[in-house]
Image (cartoon, rainbow, N blue to C red):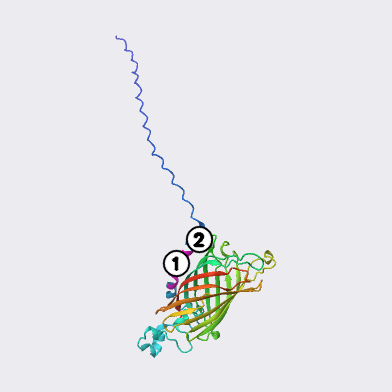
Amino acid sequence: MEPLARPSAPTRQPPPPRQAAPARQLQPPRQARPARRAPVPKNVILRTGALSLIVVLLAAAPIAARAQGAQGFALSPLGPANPLSEQQATPESAAPVQDQAESTAPAQGEQDAQSKALDSTATQWSFQLSYQNMPDYHMDTLDDGSTRAAGSTDYIQVRAVIPVALGSFTILPRITLRHYENAQGQSGIGNTEIFALIIPRAFDWGTGRFGIGPLVTLPGNGNVSRDEWGGGFAAAAVNSSGSWFYGTLFTQSWRSINPTALPPENSTTNPLGIAPIINYSFGKSGWYVGNGDQVALYDWDSGKFYLPIGVRFGKVLIREQGSWNIYGEYQTSLIYKSYPGPAVKNSYRVNVSYTIPVG
């Protein structure tokens, strides 16, 4: 009997070859960090924003006015008038169409289209854009021995009037926004002015009118205006007669601050603003001459008076839907020696405005 074979020891397998470590991927070279841009000056941002706001307002306002049918916000117990029913009810609707000169001819005791384009109190939509440059001021010595301070060097103004025609009176809200710049290069939005002229029907005699209403001034950029609220009233009386259009606008406001924070010689009463209006139209040509945006000031604290003087040349372009008023003007200071505030030496202004009569 053969002996059992001794089992052989299992063959030891060699370890598997070690895999080579994967090649290390090369990282792409790090890109240089772009140079940091210098911050945009704040006055450039403010000016760009103001100009953008002005462009948007001027572009959207006439569209909004036409969407209202150039009727303003007319409220009446009988509801809005239906132009189609009026045409059917009046035999004049079948008359031949008149040319533009005849259609704008006023009825007896009414304003013509040209004087309306010059009248900020007429019941009409009004949109205005203007630029005023004041390169130099009088730098004389005041009564207290100090040198008279200069004012802003220039500003851009946008103004809108949106009529609200009610049954027995009309409200004319007017918003004036200005972006100022001074000699130090500082710029910003000034004290925005809002007032609502209330004109009762009994005080509107066709060729003119009288109205009075509240006035509010909003805080502005402290570098170019007062960073505070104000409130008061505005009043206006105007009339047109032949080629003449004339009147006066008054504004009076008070500062909304603690009186104890002011020097003893100062009060919270702002100067009284008196704006005389005189325009003369050269026939039906559309050309006219006037005294410009002339605002006289009476300072209640010092009892002193300031009076600028100027001349405006302009052209009114009457169109079917509304009227354009384009003008340029020059102003200087006439009475200023004892007045404590700035007194402009030379001022130049260009303006374009568009009006859409209500009705």
Check disc 2 and report its element: helix, strand or loop.
helix
In the figure, 117 relative to 7: above or below? below
Q: Which residue is mark 1?
A: 55
- Marks 1 and 2, how far apart in space? 14 Å
In the rendered structure, find residue 28 and report the number of the disc placed on it. none
Res 69 seen here: no
Query: Mark 1 packing: few (<14 Cα in 10 Å), some, or many (20+)?
Result: few
- Disc nearer the start of the sequence (1/2): 2
Question: How far across and down, in percent of the image, does residue 264 sit?
Answer: 70, 66
Residue 117 versus residue 327: which sits nearer the camera?
A: 327
135 relative position to 97: left or right: right
Looking at the image, the residue that sits furthest to the front is 140
In the figure, 228 relative to 278: above or below? above
- Prevailing secondary structure of the magenta residues: helix
Q: Quadrant of the N terminus?
A: top left
Magenta region: which residues? 50-62
Please tell me in which quadrant of the rendered image residue 210 appears: bottom right
Q: Within the magenta stretch, is there residue 2? A: no
| Amino acid tagged 2 | Leu
